[in-house]
Amino acid sequence: MEIQYNPRYPSVEDLRKKAKRRIPGFAFDYLSGGANEEVNLRKNTDEIREVELMPRYITTHTHTDMKTELFGHVYDAPFGIAPVGLQGLIWPKAPEILAKAAFDYNIPFILSTVTSASIETVSEITEGRAWFQLYHPVEDELRDDLIRRAADAQCPVLVILSDVPTFGYRSKEIKNGLSMPPRMTLRNIRQILGRPHWALQTLMHGAPSFEVLKPYIPRGMNMHHLGLFMDKTFDGRLDEDKIKILRDKWKGKLVLKGVASEEDTEKAIRLGLDGIIVSNHGGRQLDAGPSSIKALRNLASKYKDQITIMMDSGIRTGPDIARTLACGADFTFMGRSFMYGVGALGEKGGNHTISILKRQLQQVLEQLCCGSVDHLPDHLM
């Protein structure tokens, strides 16, 4: 599609500021916050931006090409939309909006197990191109049914999450009552009343719920019992036996998300996985851990020829995408940037965000005199 964006919001930072003014504070905190003192949240982006790229001006540069082949599909750009839980809290129908934009612009969209649109709905929107991220259930029967639904929906890639063995300690969410079970405080009600457009849209579309899990949640549960159900139903801790079972059952591409260490990368290779996503859950889990770009540079230098290596966490802009690819990533994913877009511009937010990211990345490639994203590592200083 042609690159078009609203010139009033030409950057992700503009979208972030607009979203902050448009949605309730508790929803914005949920989207933008990190674990503990948010050291790793800040470090993720800061350390990406320490990466420098060298332009080579005296050359016969004629064009730039962002197309990238990944798992047998040629995407129009080297970035996709990362899974985000409960996206409808930020803006009604957010996952549907982003899935449609991803389909229209031919980039991947990953649906989370705990977001607010079903596997079947997103599959229909994307004509079976959406990826699915699995939070590993406690019960084998639920695991198998989720896998079956993803296969029936023609999801080409199953992403298994490794970096939530326990829920992160996020002070803002606890203070705002967005822990499990969630609670609606007087403070939150005041914030909703202060965002009438968000409130009206939410009223029209209904409160967000865990649509993927709706068939398994008993009817009539209050918030307290829903929290107990979620705690009982999911076990985020993966081991090799669980991964082996998933590898045997899933016939498509299988990707491990949340990788930071050499040990986990070597296990992914040994177990026959097709790719890893280097990630620290956007700084929302382990505040004392390494930044995503630091982990990527180490892993890409050692394993790039053995497994497809992707990255999320901390990437916000087109230059960030270029820096990450130059450091050895085969592909990149972003969550917050796209959610800021939808929070700021609603139905137009997905198309707008993809457009500015593509334009920014194109400008970086042209400025470097780099003809293809594959050649970005040649410009790494």
Image: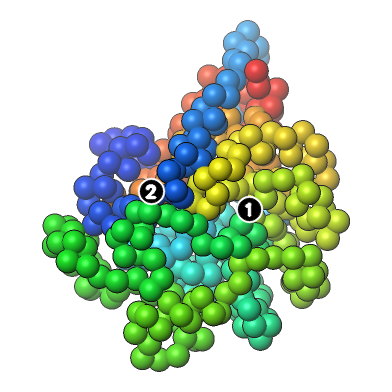
Q: Which amino acid does label 1 sit on?
A: Gly
Residue occupying image coordinates x 78% and y 49%: 263
Q: Which amino acid does label 2 sit on?
A: Ser
The reply to whether dot 2 and dot 1 touch (C-beta < 8 Å) is: no
Task: Please give the residue where the numbered disc 1 appears in the rendered image.
Answer: 258
The image quadrant of residue 288 is top right
Residue occupying image coordinates x 36% and y 91%: 220
Pinpoint residue 23: horizontal percent, then vertical percent: 25, 55
Determine whether, in the image, residue 139 is placed left or right of residue 17: right
Determine whether, in the image, residue 289 is placed left or right of residue 14: right
Relative to the observer, which residue lies in front, 130 or 197?
Answer: 197
Give the number of the disc on residue 335: none
Q: Tag 2's secondary structure?
A: helix
Task: Please give the residue where the numbered disc 2 appears in the rendered image.
Answer: 32
Q: Residue most toward the right?
A: 270
Label 1, residues with CA under 10 Å away: few <14, some 14-19, many ≥20: many
Image quadrant where one finds the C terminus: top right
Relative to the observer, which residue lies in front, 169 or 126?
Answer: 169
Q: Earlier in the sequence, mark 2 or mark 1?
A: 2
Residue occupying image coordinates x 69% and y 27%: 377
> Looking at the image, is 134 positioned above or below residue 368?
below
Does the image show residue 20? yes
> Looking at the image, is 174 positioned above or below residue 351?
below
Q: Residue most toward the bottom?
A: 219
Relative to the observer, which residue lies in front, 140 or 117?
Answer: 140
Pinpoint residue 324: horizontal percent, then vertical percent: 60, 34
